[in-house]
């Protein structure tokens, strides 16, 4: 009986010690999680002795929801996680597998091989595989590329200038007595149709007679000719430079275009999930891309190297679309192809079978539903490029402001001279006829501005003489 009591007491002590040890371990895990990450903009970047970035903000928000305490350290070998031939993992995945870290938070792609080795949460970001390259490689020629030297606003301004000049020539030719001395008997050579034709002829450097004889008309024409010469010089200069740059580049809009050319080199990050996607794919286009990269050894050692080579030109970098979007936001001369393949997600990794994975997944879904993940994306992927900054070849309206101003001054001066010429003749006629200058000027304006009845008084006089 006494032996039985001793055994029960011993069992109780063992259970108590185990219970308290288990509580101690749980408390240790709860009090401070060991988290591994890797430096990559904008997920985790150094700021003094601390780390900041999208993943650090995400970790902070998740910790608030779950009440976690943590300590972050950088992965020792600066790798994400790749399994070698012997089955061992390196990088962040390896640290989690070996128990050196409780969690790994980074742009870790959720793959089948990693899911077998560690536990992974619901994705906190969706991504895919795309192509990063310079804009002059990705942009093809269009049907109306001959309009590209000028912007749409500039073309509208040119059209307004053309119509305004034609109208000024038409009015000056009707008002100036030096151009149209006898409106009762002579026909005005500068009709509205001829004024439009004359202005169009000058715009194409062809000329169309007759030319104005009055000083007012000549001032307007000289202003238009100057405008035309400078405008055509700007147009042909920009058109020539645009065509020269386009002739040396190739249009690449997707993976099929990339596989069907041999003018530019392309590659991806060595040992990455992107490379594994092309290696394991049965798609013939993707297989050709992998075989080309394997044959030419066009792999890069880091994301920064891939972006740098793409900026240098004649290289297309294949990588995660989210990371490529960041490069486009930072470097205005780059663009990401619209085609995205192999959609996958970024997840947080924990040890296999860890009970914290469920809570992390729920917290990530809550942040997504609350819009916090979208806010963090817009915060760290904000673009520093100004819209159309790279397209400097198109002449903006403000660069031709002086030219439009000179034309406007010339048109105004010509119209003013036409009015002064008519006023001078009206004053002489008023002195001869002993009438007021205003009356004669009004009669002249009425006679000259009538389009269809300007010659009718003289015709009626001729008809009355014949009848008599």
Image (cartoon, rainbow, N blue to C red):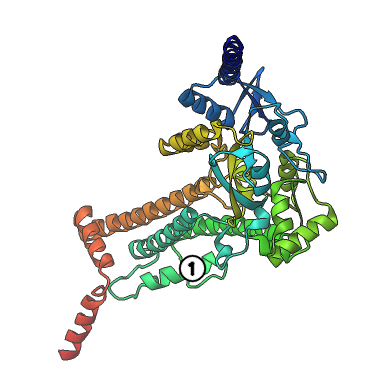
What is the tally of numbered marks visible in this picture?
A: 1
Q: Position of residue 99 (x, y in %)?
A: 70, 28
Q: Position of residue 118 (x, y in %)?
A: 65, 38
- Position of the C terminus, as image quadrant, is bottom left
* Residue 228 shows up from this direction: yes
The vertical placement of 383 against 1, above or below, is: below
Apparent side of residue 68 relative to residue 447 in the rendered image (left or right): right
Apparent side of residue 427 relative to residue 82 in the rendered image (left or right): left
Residue at (29% x, 57% y) in the render: 428
Q: Position of residue 401 (x, y in %)?
A: 50, 46
Circle 1 residue: 200
Residue at (70% x, 61% y) in the render: 286
Q: Which of these two is toward me, 12 or 380?
A: 12
- Position of the N terminus, as image quadrant, is top right
Apparent side of residue 460 relative to residue 291 in the rendered image (left or right): left
Q: Which of these two is toward me, 211 or 64?
A: 64
Q: Position of residue 217 (x, y in %)?
A: 44, 61
The vertical placement of 376 against 400, above or below, is: above
| Furthest residue in direction front, as rendered | 1
* Location of residue 252 by image quarter: bottom right
Secondary structure at badge 1 equals: helix
* Location of residue 38 by image quarter: top right
Q: How crowded is the residue under tag 1: few (<14 C-alpha within 10 Å), some, or many (20+)?
A: some
| Furthest residue in direction bottom, as rendered | 467
Q: Which of these two is toward me, 245 or 285?
A: 285
* Residue 375 shows up from this direction: no
Residue at (51% x, 69% y) in the render: 201
Apparent side of residue 292 relative to residue 217 in the rendered image (left or right): right
The vertical placement of 305 against 176, above or below, is: above
Q: Which of these two is toward me, 27 or 105?
A: 27
């Amino acid at each position: 009986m006494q032996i039985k009591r001793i055994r029960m007491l011993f069992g109780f002590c063992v259970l108590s010690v185990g219970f308290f040890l288990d509580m101690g371990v749980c408390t240790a895990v709860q009090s401070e999680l060991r988290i591994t990450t890797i430096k990559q903009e904008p997920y985790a970047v150094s700021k003094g002795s601390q780390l900041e970035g999208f993943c650090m903000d995400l970790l902070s928000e998740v910790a608030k929801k779950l009440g976690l305490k943590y300590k972050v350290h950088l992965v020792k070998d600066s790798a994400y996680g790749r399994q070698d031939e012997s089955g061992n993992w390196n990088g962040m995945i390896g640290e989690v597998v070996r128990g050196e870290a409780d969690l790994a938070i980074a742009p870790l792609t959720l793959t089948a091989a990693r899911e077998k080795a560690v536990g992974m949460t619901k994705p906190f970001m969706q991504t895919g595989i795309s192509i990063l390259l310079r804009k002059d490689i990705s942009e093809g020629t269009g049907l109306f590329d001959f309009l590209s030297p000028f912007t749409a606003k500039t073309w509208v301004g040119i059209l307004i200038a053309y119509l305004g000049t034609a109208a000024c020539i038409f009015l000056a030719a009707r008002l100036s007595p030096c151009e149209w001395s006898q409106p009762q008997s002579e026909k005005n050579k500068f009709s509205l149709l001829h004024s439009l034709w004359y202005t169009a002829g000058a715009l194409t450097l062809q000329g169309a007679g007759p030319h104005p004889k009055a000083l007012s008309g000549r001032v307007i024409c000289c202003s238009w000719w100057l405008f035309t010469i400078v405008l055509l010089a700007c147009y042909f200069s920009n058109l020539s430079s645009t065509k020269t740059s386009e002739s040396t580049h190739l249009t690449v809009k997707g993976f099929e275009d990339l596989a069907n050319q041999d003018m530019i080199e392309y590659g991806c990050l060595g040992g990455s999930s992107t490379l594994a996607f092309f290696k394991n794919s049965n798609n013939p286009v993707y297989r050709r891309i992998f075989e080309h990269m394997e044959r030419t050894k066009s792999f890069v050692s880091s994301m920064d190297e891939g972006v740098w080579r793409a900026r240098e030109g004649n290289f297309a970098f294949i990588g995660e679309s989210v990371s490529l979007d960041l490069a486009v936001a930072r470097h205005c001369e780059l663009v990401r192809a619209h085609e995205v393949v192999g959609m996958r997600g970024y997840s947080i990794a924990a040890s296999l079978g860890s009970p914290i994975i469920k809570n992390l997944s729920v917290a990530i879904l809550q942040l997504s539903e609350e819009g916090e993940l979208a806010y963090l994306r817009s915060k760290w992927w904000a673009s520093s490029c100004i819209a159309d900054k790279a397209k400097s070849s198109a002449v903006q309206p403000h660069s031709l402001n002086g030219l439009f101003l000179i034309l406007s001054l010339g048109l105004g001066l010509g119209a003013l001279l036409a009015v002064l010429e008519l006023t001078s003749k009206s004053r002489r006629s008023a002195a001869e006829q002993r009438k007021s200058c205003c009356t004669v000027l009004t009669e002249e304006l009425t006679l000259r501005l009538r389009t269809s009845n300007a010659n009718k008084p003289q015709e009626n006089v001729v008809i009355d003489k014949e009848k008599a």
